C-alpha cells in the first residue's frame, strides 16, 4: 500500500475538477478557507525550491513577496521558472513521509503551468481538458438515479439509510448492514472506492449514505453493504461526513 502522503496527494489530484474553481470530495462539505492566499482563484510566481518525491513534484514559489508551497503530478520545473495555476485544495500540517517533511500550509493542484514552456509535462492533462475520470467536454453527464420509496427491501436484521442517520447514539462505531442502490461511484480516492447509496428512505440530508470499500460497483447496482459506521468523520481540509460506513464489504445483488 502506498504511503499516506502519496495517497492523500493522489486523492486531491483525482478529485480536482474543471467544472468548478474548487475541489470537493463526494458527499463532503467544505468549509471556506480563512487564509487570504487560499481564497485567491489564480496564482503566479517565481519558483524558489522544487523537489520530486513519490511520483509528485513539490514546488515552493514566491508571490507578492511571500513564499508558498504547492504539490502536483510530477512535472519538469526549475528554480527561477515562473509558474501559474488556479485554485487547488488546501491542506494544513501535511506530512510527506518520502520527504520526511511537514508542510504547514500547502495547496494540491491538478495542473501547474510553467509560463513560456512549449508544452506541459506528459503527466498533465492539456489545459482546459477534464482530468482522468471526468465526463469529457461535450459529452452528456449520466442522468441522476432516482430511488423511489419502497423500491428497496430492507436488509434482514439490518437498517435503512435514514435509520443510520437517526440512530446515531446507538449505532456509533458498530457494524451495520443495509441494502441500497448505487447513485454515485468514484474509484481510487485515498486508496479506496467511494460509493453513495440510497434506499428510498429519508429526506434531503438523510437519504444518501457514503460507503468506502475496495469493491467496484456501477451506478444503478443494488448492493448489500456491511461495515462499521462512523459519524462526523473529518478527513481534514474542511471535508466532513455526517455519516459514513468505512472499509465495507459490498455485494452486488442485481
Image (cartoon, rainbow, N blue to C red):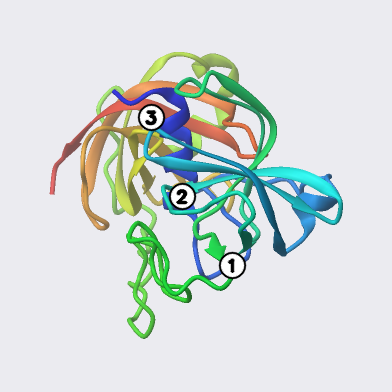
- Residue 5 at x, y percent in the picture: 47, 28
Looking at the image, which is closer to me, 94 or 202?
94
- Disc number for residue 159: 3
What is the secondary structure assignment of the residue under circle 1? loop
Disc 3 and disc 2 in contact, CB within 8 angstroms: no
Label 1 vs 2, first from the N-terminus: 2
For the point 62% across and 61% down, the residue is: 83
Location of residue 159 in the rendering, given as x and y in whole percent from the top left corner: 38, 29
Q: Nearer the viewer, mark 3 or mark 1?
A: 1
Left/right placement of residue 146 relative to residue 21 reads left
Give the Cα separation between the discs numbered 3 and 1.
Answer: 35 Å
Q: Secondary structure at mark 3?
A: loop
Farthest bottom residue?
138
In the rendered image, which residue does mark 2 sit on? Answer: 13
At x 41%, y 71%, the residue is 119
146 vs 39, left or right, is left
Question: What crowding class fits label 3: few (fewer than 14 Cα within 10 Å), some (14-19), or many (20 or more)?
Answer: some
- Residue furthest toward the front? 80
Residue 151 position (above or below residue 171):
below
Residue identified by numbered label 1: 20
Instruction: Give the label on residue 240, or none.
Output: none
Image position of 150 with respect to 126: above or below: above
Disc nearer the start of the sequence (3/2)? 2
Q: Residues within 10 Å of mark 1 (few under 14, many from 20)?
A: few
Quadrant, the N terminus: top left
Helix, strand or loop at label 2? It is helix
Dot placed on the residue nearer the N-terminal end, 3 or 1: 1
| Position of residue 205 measured from the top left corner of the image (x, y, whole percent) | 59, 48
Cα separation between marks 3 and 2:
35 Å
Mark 1 vs mark 2, foreground winner is: 2
- The residues tagged by marks 1 and 2 sit, at their Cα atoms, a distance apart of 14 Å
Horizontal arrangement in the rendering, residue 46 relative to residue 128 (left or right): right
Amino acid at each position: 500500500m502506498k504511503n499516506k502522503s502519496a495517497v492523500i496527494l493522489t486523492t486531491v489530484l483525482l478529485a480536482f475538477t474543471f467544472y468548478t474553481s474548487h475541489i470537493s470530495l463526494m458527499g463532503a462539505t467544505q468549509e471556506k478557507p480563512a487564509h487570504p492566499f487560499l481564497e485567491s482563484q489564480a496564482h503566479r510566481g517565481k519558483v524558489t525550491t522544487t523537489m520530486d518525491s513519490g511520483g509528485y513534484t513539490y514546488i515552493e514559489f514566491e508571490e507578492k513577496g511571500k513564499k508558498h508551497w504547492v504539490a502536483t503530478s510530477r512535472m519538469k520545473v526549475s528554480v527561477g521558472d515562473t509558474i501559474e495555476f488556479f485554485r487547488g485544495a488546501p491542506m494544513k500540517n501535511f506530512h510527506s513521509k518520502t520527504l520526511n517533511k511537514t508542510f504547514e500550509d500547502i495547496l494540491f493542484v491538478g495542473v501547474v503551468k510553467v509560463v513560456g514552456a512549449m508544452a506541459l509535462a506528459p503527466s498533465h492533462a492539456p489545459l482546459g481538458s477534464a482530468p482522468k475520470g471526468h465526463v469529457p467536454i461535450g459529452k452528456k453527464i449520466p442522468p441522476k438515479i432516482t430511488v423511489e420509496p419502497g423500491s428497496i427491501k430492507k436488509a434482514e436484521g439490518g437498517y435503512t439509510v435514514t435509520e443510520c442517520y437517526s440512530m446515531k447514539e446507538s449505532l456509533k462505531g458498530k457494524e451495520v448492514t443495509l441494502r441500497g442502490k448505487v447513485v454515485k461511484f468514484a474509484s481510487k480516492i485515498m486508496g479506496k472506492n467511494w460509493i453513495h447509496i440510497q434506499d428510498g428512505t429519508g429526506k434531503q440530508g438523510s437519504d444518501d449514505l457514503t460507503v468506502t470499500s475496495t469493491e467496484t460497483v456501477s451506478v444503478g447496482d443494488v448492493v448489500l453493504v456491511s461495515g462499521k459506521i462512523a459519524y462526523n468523520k473529518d478527513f481534514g481540509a474542511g471535508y466532513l461526513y455526517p455519516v459514513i460506513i468505512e472499509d465495507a464489504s459490498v455485494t452486488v445483488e442485481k
